Image: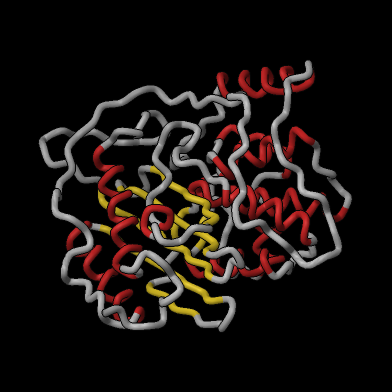
Amino acid sequence: MRPSRKSRENFMSRLIRCLTVMIFLLGAPLACTIPTETNSVVDIPATSPAVATPDLLPADDPPAGDGATVSPEPFPSARVPVSAPLTERISAAVATAAAERGADMSIAVLDRATGGYLEGAAAEPVETASLAKLFIAAQMYHLDALGERPLSDFDRLLLQRMLESSDDDAANTLWDDLGGSDIVVDVAGRYGLAATTPPWDGLWWNTETTAADLVTFYAGLLDDRDGLGPGRIAEFVGYLRSSTPEGIDGYDQRFGIPDGLPGESVVGVKQGWMCCVGDRWIHVSTGLIGADNRYIVAVASREDIRYEDDEESYPDTAITDVTEDSSARHARDTMTGFVKSLFPTGVVDDWAQPQG
């Protein structure tokens, strides 16, 4: 997760980084899997076990209060026709989320085997929140492939924590080391991300993108558009497949694709969340579906902050712990319900077929 328009580059964060480097240099054990670079076709295993690592980069958000959700009604409602083709379900789900949940949704879906592509409001810009970590990782692997900045074991530890558990301090370290906003410019150029722009304030979480561009990025990664080589791609995807149920700060990051597609046994995801942008929650759920990464799905939402009672909590992720915040839970449920309404069988394999 990330705050909006507020930097967490405070004294404590810098102190933690210094201590982290000292621990590493003094011989702290590393636990990370480093795939071997080969010249063969990318062969990513169907399962990639989570890797245990020491808690080197703790979150530092203070605790906050809680509220009650506005709408106890399940989402999606019967207004989303489960028997309709996916194109119709997308339109209905977008409209229903806006009417019932106060959420503006966008989605893009690609079938890499057939080239089939469907979307709903996929050109709408949205702040990346932690999805910017994908671009940081892409830049790391790019520089490693060129031999300009070979990856160290410590780099891989940071990549692992950043991609699997959405570690913000790891992202801060790599963002600063690699040139900040220039990362976004470089990656967008190499991957053809026409609607992806660097953050207006230099803070990675305020990078802007679209659901369509996120699908384009993943497709380019899997097709090796950047010349990373199969080993690096396998390592990258392996981290996504080892996404932890909770972020390093305790936030539930199973919303959207992970909980919305319970029938899929092989899913690699990167999630993003933050509050508040224009008094709204941002949630983004993206993933590679299937052992062969056949399907790419990207879903994003902007949802109003919603509490049932008179509490006037403001779940600003710059300064509060929102792990139990009910407005955050409401927004996560919207994301998961949205995905379930599009794929009611819990899998993506039949996405082009009517459900009945």
Where residue 261 appears, x then y in whole percent?
Answer: 40, 60
Return the x and y of residue 135 as percentages of the image width and height.
63, 53
230 up-or-down from 174: above or below: below
Left or right: 103, with 269 as reference point: left
- Image quadrant in which you'd find residue 260: bottom left
Up the image or down, 8 lies above or below 236; here it is: above
Q: How many marks?
A: 0
What residue is rendered at 47% in x and 37% in y?
A: 247
Image quarter of the C terminus = bottom left
| Residue 288 appearing in the image | yes
Display colour scheme: secondary structure
Q: For residue 245, what is the image quadrant?
A: top left
Q: In the figure, is residue 30 to the left or right of 217? A: right
Image position of 140 (left or right of 340): right
Query: Residue 110 appears at what percent x and percent y?
Result: 51, 74
Please tell me which residue is depicted at 76% across the width and 43% down the height of the picture: 34
Q: What residue is drawn where x is 23% and y is 64%?
A: 98
Q: Is residue 168 left or right of residue 350?
A: right
- The residue at the point 34 percent across, 34 percent down is 322
Q: Position of residue 259 (x, y in %)?
A: 38, 53
Residue 123, visible in the rendered structure: no
